[in-house]
Image (cartoon, rainbow, N blue to C red):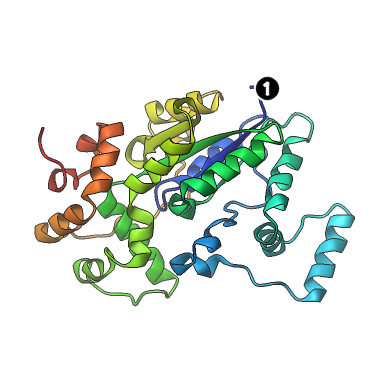
């Protein structure tokens, strides 16, 4: 690959995005920069995403960050995130700077909450990089919505944003239709935004359930034009187990009905959803 390329990862959350970032970042000619997730654009959405807004650092911290960068040291992570949130042009210049380094042709920002970005924001990101001679390719990974919601819910509990419960069913029933859950589970909206902005050759949809297989890795590698390395399939990053115990069938049906548009959009693009998502039969007809 000779074309300078920026990979915009829109998640989804708990769908292997950390692994995708790590896989692409370790490729020859790649440099994804200082942060794993930059979390630059979602604070503008407000609501459940407002918590990602980094407050202005005290003057002392800002001066310390300037001194560090002046002597070639790494900019503190939160200072960098604040700086990029505060100045959109700085975001584009930051990644253009990475791509200006000798031998670097690929970079990117794979942040799960970007799944909620509207097409207008995606278009601006594409255009701003195009103005700098950089191509933008979008990646979006999806997971069985029930499994994704369960993993998401346990993360919220671990971070004390939800009260921990002993059983799986009761808290999930209370959680699945909340603004927090809804904002990250409407795959149909994310797919529509991606397809409105990116040409078919510049967008990649995949499923968490086969992402780590040799076939899944080969598909991602082919899209990114990098050598396929199936040995990385056993190295899931940031994985969170589904937990013990099965869910009541009525709850599975309830969640699937609520998110039916997401199931339908995913299955239309990737028919193997029907076989790989255990909850798919509750949302999709047999036809």
Residue shown at 87%/62% (left/top)? 67
Q: Which residue appears farthest toward the right when viewing the image?
A: 71
Apparent side of residue 102 relative to residue 157 in the rendered image (left or right): right
- Residue 162, percent across and down? 36, 74
Q: Is residue 62 left or right of residue 110?
A: right
Residue 263, can we see it?
yes
Quadrant occupied by the N terminus: top right
Q: Which residue is mark 1?
A: 2
> Residue 132 versus residue 113: which sits nearer the camera?
132
| Above/below status of 133 relative to 43 | above
Furthest-front residue in this view = 120
One can see residue 10 in this view? no
Q: Residue at x 68, y 62 (%)?
A: 86
Q: Is residue 94 left or right of residue 176?
A: right
Residue 119 position within the rendered picture, expressed as x and y whole percent measured from the top left: 47, 45
The quarter in which the C terminus is drawn is: top left
Q: Nearer the viewer, residue 243 or 226?
A: 226
Q: Pointer 1: residues within 10 angstroms few (<14), some, or many (20+)? A: few
The residue that appears at 48% across and 65% down in the rendered structure is: 49
Residue 256 placed where, x, y %? 19, 52
Please tell me whether residue 194 is drawn above or below residue 177 in the rendered image.
above
The percent coordinates of residue 66 (x first, y second) are: 84, 62
Residue plotted at (35% across, 66% down) = 179
* Location of residue 271 (image quadrant): top left
At mark 1, the secondary structure is: loop
Left-right relation of 8 to 203: right
Q: State how many labels appear.
A: 1
Q: Nearer the viewer, residue 126 or 282?
A: 126
| Residue sitting nearer the eye, 46 or 98 | 46
């Amino acid at each position: 690959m000779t074309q300078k390329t920026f990979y915009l990862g829109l998640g989804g959350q708990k769908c292997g995005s950390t692994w995708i970032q790590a896989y692409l970042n370790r490729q020859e000619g790649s440099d994804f920069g200082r942060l794993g997730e930059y979390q630059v654009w979602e604070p503008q959405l407000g609501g459940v995403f407002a918590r990602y807004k980094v407050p202005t650092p005290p003057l002392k911290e800002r001066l310390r960050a300037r001194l560090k960068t002046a002597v070639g040291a790494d900019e503190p992570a939160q200072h960098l995130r604040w700086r990029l949130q505060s100045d959109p042009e700085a975001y584009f210049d930051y990644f253009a700077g990475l791509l200006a380094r000798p031998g670097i042709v690929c970079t990117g920002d794979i942040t799960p909450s970007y799944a909620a970005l509207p097409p207008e924001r995606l278009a601006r990101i594409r255009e701003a990089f195009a103005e700098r001679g950089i191509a933008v390719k979008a990646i979006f990974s999806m997971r069985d919505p029930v499994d994704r919601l369960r993993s998401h819910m346990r993360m919220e509990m671990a971070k004390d944003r939800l009260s921990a419960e002993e059983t799986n069913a009761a808290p999930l029933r209370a959680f699945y239709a909340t603004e927090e859950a809804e904002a990250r589970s409407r795959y149909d909206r994310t797919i529509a935004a991606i397809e409105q902005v990116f040409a078919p050759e510049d967008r990649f949809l995949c499923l968490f359930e086969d992402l780590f297989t040799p076939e899944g890795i080969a598909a991602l590698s082919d899209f990114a034009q990098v050598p396929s390395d199936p040995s990385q399939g056993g190295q899931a990053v940031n994985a969170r187990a589904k937990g013990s115990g099965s869910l009541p069938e009525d709850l599975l049906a309830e969640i699937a009905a609520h998110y039916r548009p997401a199931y339908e959009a995913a299955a239309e693009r990737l028919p193997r959803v029907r076989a790989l998502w255990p909850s798919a039969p509750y949302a999709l007809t047999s036809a």
